[in-house]
Amino acid sequence: MTATTETRPFEAEVAQVLHLVTHSLYSHKEIFLRELVSNASDACDKLRFEAIADPTLMAGDDLHIDVSFDKDARTITVRDSGIGMSRDEVVANIGTIASSGTRRFLEAMSGEQKADARLIGQFGVGFYSAFVVADRVVVRPRRADLAEAEGVQWESDGRGEYSLSQVALPARGTEVVLHLKPDEDEFLAAWTLRSLVTRYSDHVAFPIRMPVADGADAGDDAASPDGVGDAGGDSGNAGEATTPRWEAINSASALWARPKAEISDEDYQSFYKALGHDFNDAAAWTHNRVEGSQSFTTLLYLPAQPPFDLMMGGRDERKGLKLYIKRVFVMDAAEELLPNYLRFVRGVVDADDLPLNVSRELLQHNRQLDRIKGACVKRVLDLIEKLARDEPETFAAFHKAFGNTLKEGIGEDHANRERIAKLLRFASTGTTAAPAEPGRQMVSLDDYVARMPEGQDTIWYVTADSYAAAKGSPQLEAFRARDVEVLLMFDRIDEWMLGSLREYAGKRLQHVAKGELPLDDAAREARDAATTAATPLLSRLKALLGDRVADVRVSTRLTDSPSCLALADHDMAPHLARLLREAGQDVPESQATLEINPAHALLQRLDTEADDARAADLALLLLEQAEITAGAPLPDPAAFVQRMNRALMG
């Protein structure tokens, strides 16, 4: 080691993470071992990939991960023979969190609910889980392409700063030494460490080894190996220990490459939990091998719950599939293998051959890649359809978590639009329970079409900001009176989705506010008679409202409410226009048509109001309440309040 040791402060968000880790109570403290082994496996994968171009990187040692402990020194050591890190990489990977999702992670960890270590892996900050059980952590890496003298020692107690120094390390890879807190003795036992490896990391495709002392079994007498487990004197008794035998304690085979008949459901779930950094079971999975001119294996999972980076980070923070070529790791997040709207899927693709570009980081687009992507999309949609058909309760929970993400596919994946639409579920006036209530009912488009009476050729829907606003829309009154079912759409993405979903199963989708309702002869005659009788009132309203409206007419939609907005077939709904403006987009101003119910007391009062000022107030209130129920913002809320107060007083 050089005489100079440099001390640096942690980047601010790292310090926040460490504060939460060291000052909170956690369930599942054993997560630290899963995360450290996962990091070690990634390092071995990366070395094997880089060695394709430079075989000398693999010289002198095979790929493995060693786990050892020392009761006297109270340390646990995880060491890998992977790619290692340079000094700059240590600073970048440990001293800084370069993830834009970290702030959301901090918000999740410091909310009202007690922080839980199970969140750590979902945000790429798994290394820091070491401080759940350790009050001091030492990391000694040496990159495979650097000389022995260029090893690095990183050390911290997790209290805001870390030290860096240069050390000589004879072997490539990374060694992490955890000095356990006083109350964490449970992890200083071989059977405990072995059981955790079996539970969380049995699928890792590299041998995970523990030392077995001569003359002893795999029990608690196994100590850290001399010069390996606790290099640099951390073990406390490394010099006294004899060189142990190393024993692999995991299956060390790629689970996806094994025959399906040999893999249990428990094996699949265990692999998923490590792959997705999730403590929950997957909702479903599909495992397939494709043979032919291009051969590849896929193992794809549907999560039961959305990861935080999906729901809080949005589209820009999605994860791709892990990509291997002939079991050699290539990419951790191959986004080219699935479209955006399926970004919640976790899994592995192992291809026999795929071309890489000169950087070997991005896949070249070609027909082989397109074929694999098409197969992955088909498998995922098949899996979701099977879940909907065979396990409706599990599917309902899945749809609640990922339904809005699936809706993105309506606009993104034209080839599968009908299949995706078939999987969506909506609230409806044909169901009685609100979506937030237990036992709620959500209907599919197939359900709606099957219930359509003879002669109905339109799927009717209404959009709003919430279920209550959609259900209470005055534009539904005539539909209820005629017992016509209407879909209630209140998610922000629904308006965008409906721009691409114009029809389903040969039936046109139409907003209840757009166009004119289909009327039989009797209803048409009644509307015409009402229009004739209300001609003076319509003329007065047009004069009072001026260019605030395109027209005023008698409504066939209303039975109880005084007014509502009606739109032309190609007009943008006020709800959508407001959402687009909030997103910073320019939306041209448009005028809606005001429809009125002449039989309502407010219209009758306006018809007989002699005071022009009061009549103007009433006319504007009728328009503004129609705008509010349609989801449009009021141009002048203060003036609306003043008008309302004047009307209430008199």
Image (cartoon, grey):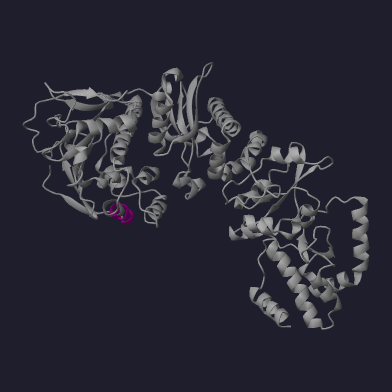
> Is residue 16 covered in magenta?
yes
> Could you say which is closer to the camera, residue 324 or residue 344?
344
Give the image location of residue 91, x and y in percent.
Answer: 27, 47
Name the side, left or right, on which 571 lies relative to 46: right
Q: What secondary structure is the magenta-colored segment mainly?
A: helix
Q: In the rendered image, is residue 339 in sight?
A: no
Name the side, left or right, on which 531 lies relative to 229: right
Give the image location of residue 161, x and y in percent.
Answer: 23, 54
Stretch in magenta: 12-19
Q: Residue furthest left?
A: 240
> Could you say which is closer to the camera, residue 309 or residue 412?
309
Q: Quadrant of residue 528?
A: bottom right
Above or below, 449 relative to 206: below
Q: Quadrant of residue 188?
A: top left
Give the image location of residue 63, x and y in percent.
Answer: 27, 26
Give the image location of residue 579, x and y in percent.
Answer: 62, 58
Q: Quadrant of residue 504?
A: top right
Q: In the rendered image, is residue 31 in sight?
A: yes
Name the side, left or right, on which 559 lies relative to 418: right
Name the side, left or right, on which 571 lies relative to 519: left
